[in-house]
Image (tube, helix red, strand yellow):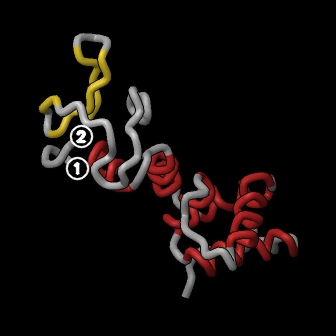
Amino acid sequence: MNSIPLSEPDGSGPLAICRGHRTWLIDRYQIDAMIALCYYSDEAPASDRDLEADQKAKRHIRTCPKCRTWIHSAIPEAVMRRQYRLSRYCCAGMFVAVEESGEKNKIDFELYRGEDPCWRINGKRSFISFCPWCGKKLPDKPFING
């Protein structure tokens, strides 16, 4: 049973178009973290058969004032904040290594000699250029400043 409500924050029923798009996202992604990630990113996988409907639902949720209010009330603020930060990274593996790994397998960024971009692993300058998990080229600055 799904615990994410379809109703408006005040308890009233949504417009039919909003109900359809909310239902699509809830049925497809099922958990609040994935629905929040869909709000911030188009990276969530969708089959070719579902791609158009998926994109349409995401576009509606992002642009409809009622649905933007709904998603921020239906999904806990901490989940929304984490998924927003995750959406700024190349992949979940890099996000965890930078923000949630503690001291082991920690990846961070520094400007070596104040000018050369340097990604470090466990505090050691590694000068890696590509993500170890997804293979994408790493930026020459932190994924998120601050």
Amino acid identity at mark 2: Ile
Residue 143 visible (yes or no): yes
In this rendering, is residue 56 above or below 3?
above
Q: Looking at the image, which residue is at 62% across and 65% down?
A: 74
Residue 20 in percent (x, y) is at 79, 76
Taking the view exactly as shown, the residue that stands out farthest to the bottom is: 1
Taking the view exactly as shown, the residue that stands out farthest to the right is: 16
Relative to the observer, which residue lies in front, 138 or 20? 138
Residue 7 in percent (x, y) is at 74, 72
Q: Are marks 2 and 1 in contact (CB under 8 Å)?
A: yes
Q: Looking at the image, which residue is at 74% across and 69% down?
A: 52
| Marker count (numbered) | 2
Residue 123 in percent (x, y) is at 14, 33
In this rendering, is residue 63 above or below 111?
below
Residue 68 in percent (x, y) is at 72, 55
Quarter of the rendering occupied by the N terminus: bottom right
Q: Looking at the image, which residue is at 71% across and 64% down?
A: 55
Q: Disc 2 marks which residue? A: 107
The crowding category of the residue bearing disc 2, from other C-alpha atoms within 10 Å (few below 14, some 14 to 19, many at least 20), is: many
Q: Is residue 32 left or right of residue 52?
A: left
Quarter of the rendering occupied by the C terminus: top left
Amino acid identity at mark 1: Ser
Q: Quadrant of residue 38?
A: bottom right
Q: Is residue 118 left or right of residue 72?
A: left
Q: Disc 1 marks which residue? A: 101
Label 2 vs label 1: CA separation? 8 Å
Circle 2: element type: strand
Relative to the observer, which residue lies in front, 69 or 137? 137
Circle 1: element type: loop
* Dot 2 or dot 1, earlier in sequence: 1
